[in-house]
Amino acid sequence: MHPWIGAGDEDRRRILTELGLSSIDELFSSIPAEVCVERVALDDGRDETAVRNELISMAHANLSPECVPSFLGAGVYRHVQPSVVDAVLSRAEFFTSYTPYQPEISQGTLQVIFEFQTLMCQLTGMDVANASLYDGATGLVEAVLFAHRLKRGKLDRVVLAETVHPMYRRVLSTYADPAGLEVVVVPPGDDGRISADAVRDAAGDNRSCCVAIQSPNFLGIVEDLPSVADAAHEAGALAVQVIAEAVSLGLLAGGGAHDFDVVCGEAQSFGLAPGFGGPHLGFFTCREKNIRQLPGRLAGETLDDNRQRAFCLTLSTREQHIRRAKATSNICTNQGLMALAATIWLEAIGGHGLRDVATASLSRTEELKRRIAELGGGWKLAYPSSPTFNEFLLTGPGTGDELARRLAEEGVLAGVSAHRWGGSWPEGLLVAVTERNTAAEMEAFLDALGRVS
């Protein structure tokens, strides 16, 4: 293989001509001028360490969760990160591996996928889990398409709670229209929860392939899962639980305990640090009776010719492995490295550790909610009587965008504006609290609320 050689002047000219552009600057014209830097003002002749230190000092001008109190959430969460996760993740045999096509040389990757599947089944209470979904949004999409296939494509209505993460709903919308699916969105009630009666009305009588609901939902509220599952099944639809904050499974029973047919979502909280939108890790679990319609791949355990424990791809239902007409999904990018991170994280902290992380997140959230309720100054909990896990909607003297900006000026990343996503909920900030938020950070948050009242 020849060494890589970067593009030269002639290559750049040809690329720009093909794009119909006259300059590199025109190529990047969509980037706002105020965030562009023509040249970093650094003196000539400085050594690497000096330059690095200067750039670090510049970076400190940014507000980041590592520098100031942060209560950002809305689907991406900061949790404890044992150093062993990055240590294992950085090993060359894992870091450079791609996808386990040849089991004889992919035993480590296959074992990780097998263990990840096992852990997700234990946490969700379901029978089987797959691997290699991109994120929570594609997990939801695959669940809907899965339900549509199980209903033999005859039921085209999808009942979707409005309190499912708005980004997940947008991705589903992208898939639904070409697939001929009708998505009926059910708004929450005055308590921020989806009622079973609203689900029954939207699902009709044997007209819907599935009902999808997130819990804890986008507003941080824990839904009444048993009643929603019953309503879905009464209407002849599959019940799908979506999870965006996987650490909640340390305290809350997964949908498997409430007779759900699918539990899917985002496992970013298990060892993946927030980072400009990714990479993330989707998961998908279901009942064993429906395993043939499982998307992606399934790693299984077997015995080799020497009767030794071995791992293999037991089920691969994408068009690369089987006839195209029989494929269930073209999900194919191997998220094995992300699954490895989640597996190491879960096995490092263990079951008791996961419960401790979840308990600390819940208790600190409840403490902050109590203090805010006593604060006054126009600050209110949007749904004070509804049960939450580690996130809640806070309303105050201004729009969500205004409050986020003013509190950032006070040195606190106070939350994410909820209304900018669109929805029937009040204006305000989604505030997320995890075990990473210290008592001092919570005091700083309350002080900042007092100053902008």
Image (spheres, rainbow, N blue to C red):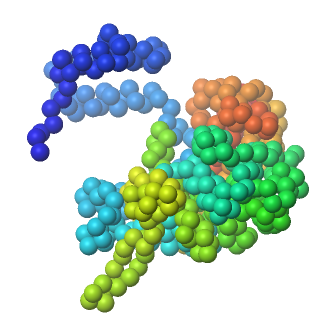
Q: Nearer the viewer, residue 320 or 34?
A: 320
Let me know if residue 67 appears in the view: no
**Residue 24 location, quadrant:** top left
**Residue 424 location, quadrant:** top right
Q: In x, y percent, where is residue 249? A: 62, 64
Q: Is residue 302 above or below residue 351?
A: below
Quadrant into which the N terminus falls = top left
Q: Nearer the viewer, residue 127 or 82?
A: 127
Q: In x, y percent, where is residue 216? A: 70, 55
Q: In x, y percent, where is residue 449? A: 71, 34
Q: Is residue 274 left or right of residue 170?
A: left
Please report the residue visible at 75 percent of the width from the left and 61 percent of the height from the top.
Answer: 237
Q: Is residue 200 above or below residue 2?
A: below
Please report the residue visible at 38 percent of the width from the left and 26 percent of the height from the top.
Answer: 58
Q: In x, y percent, where is residue 41? A: 30, 16
Looking at this rendering, what residue extends furthest in the left direction? 2
Let me know if residue 422 appears in the view: yes
